[in-house]
Structures are given as C-alpha cells and as structure tokens.
Image: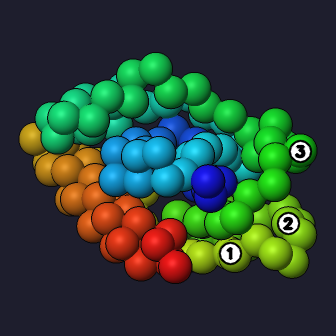
C-alpha cells in the first residue's frame, strides 16, 4: 500500500480537500495523510464545500508536517508554492510532485463569490486527485 502526504501551508483547505479526494479515489490502494508547514485548523468552508460533493472531511485534523517525521511516504504532493519552497527534506525514494492551487481561504467578495471560489478550487483538486490515482499511483 502506497503512503501519500499532501502538503500545504496551513493544512486548512487545499491539502484537506486533496486528502479527502485521494482517500475517495484510491480506496484501499493508499494511505493518505495531509499536513501543513503550519497548522491553521480545518476551514469550515472547505468542509461544507466538500460535503456538497459527497465527501466528508469534518473529522479531519490540521497537522504539522513534523508530526509525520517517522512515516515512510512514497509520494509527497505539495499543493501550494509556499509548501514546495519550504518542504522539509524527505528521503530520495520519495516522489515529490507539485501543483499550485489558488488559496480559496483568501477569496474575497460576497458569500456567494467566496463559495464559488471554494467550489472552483475543489473541482480543480478533484480532477488532480483523480488523475493522480489513475496515473502515478497505479504505476
């Protein structure tokens, strides 16, 4: 079973959504974790946006990457540029992959506009997770 870490700045939105979708698409083929360079708490809007698509991340916790120092990951997926730049050292056998998603927590405007940004990012992450599971994870 492959072990995947999704890494973001605060482990509140993007990495939480990616963890939810990777768990959904990979099923028993992977053990999925998410963490941040910092821990900001799981964003309630991320939870609500994922719930709209049938994925429950309400039980997720916000964790710092150093909490997983003893886990031998097969993949580390950074989902924001800040996490990629500040990514800690991982052994050479780990495959590091990166995709920078916009931070929906920084969305401004009306509640409807903010919700729309969360949905756009969620859908981008969903496509990325589905493609990752169908591609690199299956190899």
In the picture of the structure, the residue carrying the numbered disc 3 is 70
Q: Position of residue 36 (x, y in %)?
A: 67, 46
In the picture of the structure, the residue carrying the numbered disc 1 is 96
- The reply to whether discs 2 and 3 touch (Cβ–Cβ < 8 Å) is no
Q: Position of residue 67 (x, y in %)?
A: 82, 37
Q: CA distance from mark 1 to mark 2?
A: 9 Å
Residue visible at 34% across and 53% down in the picture = 25
Looking at the rendered structure, the secondary structure element under dot 1 is strand
Of 49 and 60, which appears nearest the observer? Answer: 60
The first of marks 2 and 3 along the sequence is 3
Q: How many marks?
A: 3
Q: Is residue 115 above or below residue 86?
A: above
Q: Residues within 10 Å of mark 3 (few under 14, many from 20)?
A: few
Q: Is residue 54 above or below residue 2?
A: above
Looking at the rendered structure, the secondary structure element under dot 2 is loop
Q: CA distance from mark 1 to mark 3?
A: 17 Å
Q: Which quadrant of the view contains residue 49? A: top left
């Amino acid at each position: 079973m492959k072990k995947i870490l999704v890494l973001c700045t605060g482990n509140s939105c993007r990495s939480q959504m990616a963890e939810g979708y990777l768990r959904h698409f990979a099923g028993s083929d992977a053990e999925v974790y998410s963490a941040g360079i910092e821990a900001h708490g799981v964003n309630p809007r991320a939870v609500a946006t994922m719930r709209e698509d049938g994925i429950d991340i309400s039980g997720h916790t916000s964790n710092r990457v150093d909490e997983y120092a003893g886990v031998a990951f097969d993949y580390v997926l950074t989902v924001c540029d800040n996490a990629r730049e500040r990514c800690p050292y991982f052994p050479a056998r780990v495959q590091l992959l990166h995709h920078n998603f916009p931070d929906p927590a920084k969305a401004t405007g009306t509640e409807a506009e903010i919700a729309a940004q969360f949905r756009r990012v969620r859908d981008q992450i969903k496509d990325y997770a589905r493609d990752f599971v169908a591609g690199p994870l299956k190899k």
